[in-house]
Image: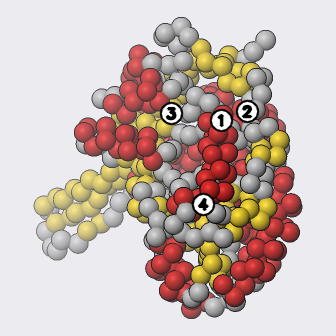
Amino acid sequence: MTQRFGHWINGDWRDPSGGTWLASTQPGTDAVVCEIAEGNAADIDAAAVAASAAAASWRDLKPIERGRRLMALSRALRERVDELGDLENREAGKAALMGPIEVHGSADYFEFYAGLVNLEAGEVLDLGPGFHSYTRREPFGVVGIITPWNAPLNQAARAAAPALAAGNTVVLKPSEITSASSLRLAELTAGAGIPDGVFNVVTGTGPAVGQPLVEHRSVCKVAFTGSLRAGREVGRIAGERIIPVTLELGGKSANIVFADADIGAAVQGSLRAFVLNTGQICSSGTRLLVQADIHDAFVEALVDASSQYAPFLGQLTTEAQFDKVNHYFEIAASEGAVAATGGRMADGWQPEITVYTNANNNLRIAREEIFGPVVAVIPFDDEESAIAIANDSDFGLAAGLWTRDISRAHRVASRLEAGQVFVNMWGTGIETPFGGYKQSGIGREKGIEALHHYTQVKSVTISL
């Protein structure tokens, strides 16, 4: 019998108020993984009311107690790595090794922020004799979180963990395509001692559930991860309501390889940068800028090493994404790009690792987010031209550079228009702030910085 998940509202399962359900199928097949509730505005209202009612007691709980409960949730996730990893793999079409990685990464968020609950205490300001002035960082109240389909559990934890640590309550709307692992997370909150109403999940489509969530009068802040188009709409609604947003949107990140780099390390790191999770990561390094002196040799080494990364490839998660990647294969051919390897689907909805040469920064494959394991290799002459090409983009989520020259590393990193820059590596852990410049978004998640975005500052001044 197909497993069916209701909404998680006020600490319990709840059937959809409209009485209808959505089937979640395994990518590339007709196999039904589960059924989820098809939510609407009434379901959002019930969750937001529950979250609002729980806000004061959660806010007023001693921070160390909040931390203990978040730590318990982290342990619960690790105890169910196999179960949750399998669920994530089946629903999102991930490669076998990816599910456990996602679960451990999600547990890391709750563990990390459990240790930071006392950090947001504020500071004392010196106004001179006769005054005592200080600041407090206080939670907003109810935070609405909307997550995409590519890394559902990890994305939910990335936003919910700092929001909860800061004393907020949460209403989460996961993608209707991959909701199951987020619903399991919600169920685990009860056993971790997180009170009813503090963490709620309502499933359904963006128009039926996401929009009412952003519009709801009880929601005081919104965190959204997804497409630029949807992010603009979330930002518009939030702007009309005058509530803060965190928007983590698209990317077309530049990864620069200088001739003096450790070529072996750069090849391996550059492959990980665009192949991990079948390329369905917003911060993937999909523009590979290689200094002209080493361009041909580097491409040859990249192609030779690409077969090692087959274990990172799963299915594309949606039929729309399958169609999109196929369309970009056609666009690349029409623009004159040459596939040094790949350029087609290997099996079902699984694309081949694809390396395009004869590319420049004006091609659509170099300017538009493809969201597959596809990279455009662009030659450059010198440091100035590399920086100019890297910054010539509507996006600015991440950037990377490979060099043995430490002075160059600092110099180039300071000039790249990106929210995070990786030197002689690609990607970091949860400790560093994550977010974008330009159309890649607003605000930051991860690291201590995320706590600032889930609190508001109050100043108190007393005449003595």
- Other residues around mark 1 within 10 Å, as few (<14) / some (14–19) / many (≥20): many
The nearer-to-camera label among 4 and 3 is 4
Indicate the quadrant where residue 210 lies. Answer: top left
Upstream in the sequence, badge 2 or badge 1?
Answer: 2
Q: Amino acid at mark 4?
A: Glu
Give the residue pinned by disc 4. Answer: 335
Upstream in the sequence, badge 4 or badge 1?
Answer: 1
Query: Does any portion of residue 195 appear in the rendered image?
Result: no
Q: Residue at x 66, y 29 (%)?
A: 180
The label shown at residue 318 is: 1
Which quadrant, please, contains the N terminus? top right
Give the residue pinned by disc 2. Answer: 27
Task: Describe residue 335's horizontal placement relative to residue 76 as left or right.
Answer: left
Is residue 450 positioned above or below 34 on the image?
below
3D distance between C-alphas at marks 1 and 3: 21 Å
Residues at circles 4 and 1 in contact by the CB criterion of under 8 Å: no
Instruction: Measuring from the top left, give residue 87's x and y in whole percent.
Output: 75, 32
Q: Amino acid at mark 3?
A: Leu
Residues at circles 2 and 3 in contact by the CB criterion of under 8 Å: no
Instruction: Measuring from the top left, give residue 200's x and y in whole percent.
Output: 51, 28
Residues at circles 1 and 3 in contact by the CB criterion of under 8 Å: no
